[in-house]
Every structure is written in C-alpha cells, then in structure tokens.
Image (spheres, grey):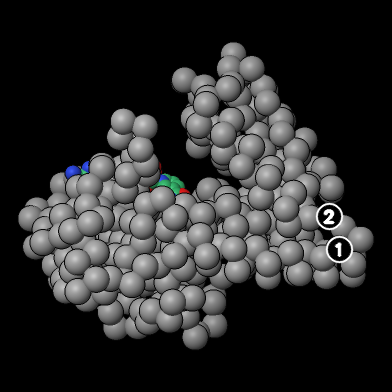
Amino acid sequence: MTATLLDGRATAKAMRAELNEAVAEFKEQTGVTPTIAVVRAGEDPGSVWYANSIKKTMAGRGMDSQLHVLPLTATEEELVALVAELNADPSIHGIMIQEPMPKGMDEAAVKAALSPDKDVDGVHDVNAGRLANAAPAGRPPGVRPFFVPATPAGGMELMRRYGIEFSGKNVVIIGRSPIVGKPMALLLMRENATVTVCHSRTKDLPAVCREADILCVAVGRAEMVKGDWIKPGAVVVDFGVNDVEGKMIGDVAYAEAAEIAGMITPVPGGTGPMTNIMLCQNLLVAAKRKAG
Ligand code: NDP
C-alpha cells in the first residue's frame, strides 16, 4: 500500500486564499487591521527565523505584525511590563511571546501576564483550561471562547480537510507537551475519539502504536516511529521537526511508514505549513471578538 499524502502545503495554500478574503471583508466592514505583536528577549536564531516567517505570512493576508525585542539581559519584570503595555494597546489584537526566554526567567509568570483574549498562541493557562474543560463537539461548549495552539489546531484542520473522521476512532498520540501533544489529545477527545497519550515512560510503545487508527507523533526524535509500528491503513500525522545534517526529518520513518499507512503527512510539507496559517486564523478571530 502507498499512503495518500496529507499535503500541508496545498492545504495551507487553499486556506491562505480563504483567509485573504475573510481579512479583506473584516477590514472593509470595520476599518480595523488585525495586528499581532511578537515579543522576545535575545536573538535566538530559531526565534528570529520564526518571527520573520510570521511577519511574511501576516503581510500576505493583509494583517500587520510588530516585533518587540528586548536584550537577552532583560529581566522578567521588563518582559512582563512590555506584555502589560501590549495588553492595554487597543491596536494590538494578538500577542505571541517567543521561546526560549532568557535563562532563569519564570516562563509561566511571563505567560500568565498575557491577556487571555490576546493569547492567539493558546499558551495562557486560561485558554489551556478552557480547552481541557470544553464539552465534546455537538454539545453546548460549557466554557467561554478560547484559543488553541496553532500546531495542533493545524494538525486537526489538515485531517478535517481530508475528510478523516474522528468519532469512535482509536487515536494514539506520542508526546504530551502543552504546545503539541496535550492539546492534540484534548482536541481529538472533544471530537469523540478514544485517545491514548504516550510519553517517555510508556511501556512497549510499538505495540500501543499498532492499535492506532490515527497516530500523531510529536516527540522530536528523527525517524523514531518505524513502519512496523503502524497499523495497515492508519492515518499518520508527524509533527516532528529534526535537523539531521542540515536536512529536515520527521519523527516517523517516512519511506517505510508510507508503505503501510493509509494517509500520512510528509516532513517537510505536512503539519509545518499549517502552523502559521492557523496563527493567522486565530489573530482574525481575536480581532473579530474585539470588534464584537
Ligand atoms: P517536547 O520536547 O516538549 O515534548 C516531547 C514529548 O515526547 C514529551 O512528552 C516526551 O515525554 C516525549 N518523548 C521523548 N522521548 C520519547 C520516547 N523515546 N518515547 C516516547 N515519548 C518520548 O517537544 P514538543 O512537543 O515541543 O515538540 C515535539 C516535536 O514537534 C519536535 O520535533 C518539535 O520540533 C516539533 N514541533 C513542530 C511544530 C510544527 O509546526 N510542526 C511546532 C512545535 C513543535 P515526557 O513527557 O515523558 O518527557
């Protein structure tokens, strides 16, 4: 069997066109340009690259981005003060705090300073808590609106657009980080999937994975998941981004997995391109909520 490609590049391209129209319509109706503020301390190369890519993606949609960079020597108080200033600025609809933060800084305290209404990256405990408490799809939500981190939101959207059904499916997720694995588990549970979350202490991981109708992998270990870990016909979603001798490699051994899976995301070109576009979508939602 050769798996169908879950093509994140093509899907993100289609979504960009849809967002362009939605943003233009919003701007015409309100005269407001959705604007994100990206905040960081220092010049971590990955953060610099990501901030540039956010700027480009936002500009392409007709949205604005501002970059606020403090020196690496900035204190927690200075970062919190900057976030408070941006919270109070009515022209800013979304704020993203880039990691890594300077060594020794209490990251939780900085994130807690964000206004949950501007937390378009879904990192504030209020947004994480609302996602955790939200009722299953199809029932009254039971919580106030919230933001979901862009990477798992992108993984869900990619699967939805390929018509993948979640209800009653056995889903296995490898990874339990607050930014990918855990929200992915909560999103799939909301969609009535039966979810198993695996991590570094899971026993006999290959056997657990073989039970999965949908296998989502967010570990950060190149080609850890082998072809014989995959149930024939399963959907495989690889969030992994690993630099192996200058080449981007996923957490799944793609060539052998693609012979067994029914559908699979490539790396690059799978979940990656979906992330920025979901951030844009979250920003538009934040601007719309503010505009009432
Ligand atoms: P973290 O390092 O925060 O989490 C990794 C998870 O993998 C942890 O839960 C850890 O378990 C688990 N793990 C580590 N080793 C093993 C193992 N041998 N067996 C089973 N589980 C293991 O990573 P992130 O969630 O932030 O990122 C995961 C991957 O996704 C990375 O490659 C990252 O680059 C990528 N990523 C991709 C994005 C995209 O846009 N596509 C965006 C964000 C991240 P434990 O909890 O026990 O430590």
Q: Are circles 1 and 2 on residues that touch, CB within 8 Å?
A: yes
Find residue 273 and report its horizontal and vertical position in percent.
51, 54
**Residue drawn at the location 49% of the way across and 76% of the way down:** 161
Find residue 146 and report its horizontal and vertical position in percent.
59, 62
Can residue 289 be seen here?
A: no
Gap between marks 1 and 2, in whole Å? 6 Å
* 124 sits to left or right of 89: left
Q: Provide the residue designation for mark 1.
A: 27
* 246 sits to left or right of 222: right
Q: Quadrant of the C terminus?
A: bottom right
Which of these two is toward me, 10 or 72?
Answer: 10
Total marks shown come to: 2
**Residue drawn at the location 60% of the way across and 69% of the way down:** 14
Which amino acid type is marked by label 1? Lys
Q: Tell me: residue 28, above or below residue 104.
A: below
- Locate residue 271: give its quadrant: bottom left
Q: Quadrant of the N terminus?
A: bottom left
- Locate residue 61: give its quadrant: bottom right
The secondary structure type at the circle numbered 1 is helix
Q: Provide the residue designation for mark 2.
A: 33
